[in-house]
Each structure stands twice: as structure tokens, then as C-alpha cells.
Amino acid sequence: MTQVAQPRPANKRAQISAPTFRTDNWRLSPILTVLGLAGFVGYATFRSFQQDHYWVELYHYLTPFYSPCLSATCEPGSAVFGTLPWAFPWFMPFAAATLPFLLLFRLTCYYYRKAYYRAIWQAPTACAVREPHRSYSGETRFPLLGQNLHRYFFWIAGAIAVLNTYDALVALFHGHNGGFGIGLGNLILLANVVLLWCYTLSCHSCRHAFGGRLRSFSRHPVRYWMWTQISRLNTRHMQFAWITLGSLVLTDLYVALLSSGVITDLRFFN
């Protein structure tokens, strides 16, 4: 009996000369991502090192980029928890204790990883698009190995969100007569805080911390309920990631314009 030769499995991947067979405008998304991230980083860097126009004494408005203000040269009243006994050099932001952790929290965020992996490192640039790198090691080597620290930065970011909430609430009790008052600046500060909480609580690490390690949901009904609510927020984590970049810029810009005297605060109740 003659045996039929079985075809041998291919030893190599299919050789495709084109970078992709996609026909849509797949370059648009990474280009917009680069422009959006670069715009925010440029603005935030400039404002953090400007060290001016960050505080409105009349209404107790403090921009999130300068909270908490720790330098001895901070504007009187802006340092709610006091300052250090020395002045910061020009290259050190007044909020040096919090800004690095907020940056690391965002930098290691699961969504932002996807954003800059694709848009900046092109690993890959888009789905079904060949990447220019010869090899892929994932997050198993330095410095990407440090992405695993995201779960710890989450807790620090949560503490900073509490601080931003305190700043927004304190400003409600500094109207014209030193009592309760509401102006447009108050609404902007409060809206920014709510959005920051939505971004922080929708974090994948938050979802895992409150319910990801449970073996039985029925034995932990409270944590299961929290995990469920966080999971709903988690589906919109990408949207909150971008929205909060815009809300931070808007909040800081409004405070800067008030502080520099360009505009006046619209008051609803004093």
C-alpha cells in the first residue's frame, strides 16, 4: 500500500510585503494621540514651573497643579497644610511632593500604556499593522518592568484626590464676606474633582483591589457590590483618562486667568 505523504507544517510566518491590508485611515488615531498627549505635557510642564498665577486669595482657588504648595515662597494662604522652611529652586515645582506620583500613576496606567505604546513607540502603531521592531519582549525588561508599580501608585493617587477634594470644598467657604459662596470657579473645581475620582476609581488596579482576588462573591456581598460599581466605571476608563486631561487644563487655566486679573469670577451666591 502506497502511503500518502503528509504536508509538513510551515516553519515560517507568512511573508507579507505590505505593512497592513487595512483600508481605513488607521494613522489618524495614533497621530491624534501624540498631539493630545504632547499638548497636555507641554502645558502642564510650563505651568508647573511657571510658579505664578496659581492662587486666587479672594475665593481661595488653588489650581491642582500646585496642590499642596510646599515652598516657603508660596503665596500666603495657598499652603493649607503649611510649607517647608526653605524656598524651592526654580527647577522644582511647588507641588513636588505630589506631581511625580501623579505622573507615574498616569504613565503606568493601563490605558495610557496602550496610548503611548502605539502612538510613540509604535508597538504596534495600530491593530493588524506590522510594527517596525524586530523583537518584542513585552514588559519583562527594564524600564517597562516598572509598569507593575501601577497598583501602588493607585493608592497614592487616591490620597491626592482626597487632597484635591479638600481644596475644592474649602473654597466654598471663602465668599466675599468670608462665608459660604458659590462662583463659576467653585463649580469648575468641583467638576474637576468629580472627574478625577471617576478616572481614579475606574482604574483596573482599583477594580482588582476591591474584588479581583475574591474566590467567592457570595461571602463578600459588600466588596462584590463595590467591584460591580467599579467595573461599570472601568468600561469608561479611556474616556475619563482623556476627559480629566482636559478638565485639569481648564481648571488651571481658569485659576491662572483669575489670578492674573484677565477675567473676574462669575458669582452665583456670596
Image: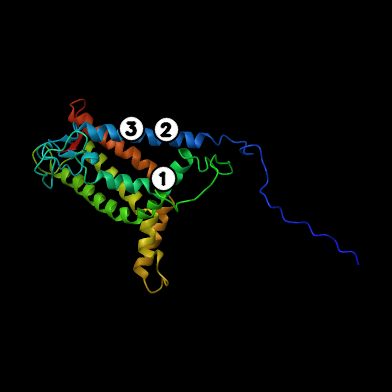
| Residue 35 vs residue 170, the one in the foreground | 35
Q: Which callout, 2 or 1, points at the residue further toward the start of the chain? A: 2
How packed mark 2 is, by other alpha carbons closer than 10 Å (few <14, some 14-19, many 20 or more), is few
Q: CA distance from mark 2 to mark 3?
A: 10 Å
Residue ID at (36%, 71%)? 220
Return the residue at label 2: 35
Task: In the displayed orientation, state which residue is furthest to the bottom.
Answer: 219
Give the side of residue 41 with respect to residue 165, left or right: right
* Marks 1 and 3 close (CB-CB < 8 Å): no
Q: Is residue 204 above or below residue 32?
A: below
Observer-nearest of 94 and 245:
94
Q: Quadrant of residue 2?
A: bottom right
Question: Which residue is painted at 42% across and 71% down in the image?
Answer: 215
Task: Identify the mark nearer the N-term, 2 or 3.
Answer: 2
Residue at point 21% right, 25% down?
262
Q: Please identify the quadrant where the N terminus is shown.
A: bottom right
Q: Position of residue 249 (x, y in %)?
A: 30, 36
Position in image of residue 193 (x %, y %): 27, 46
Quick check: 189 left or right of 135? left
* Circle 1 SS class: helix
* Structural distance between the alpha carbons of marks 1 and 3: 17 Å
Q: Which residue is mark 1?
A: 112
Q: Can I make out residue 195 in this image?
A: no
Disc assigned to residue 42: 3
Of residues 169 and 3, the one drawn nearer to the viewer in this rendering: 3
Q: Give the amino acid type for the residue marked by disc 3 in the picture.
A: Gly
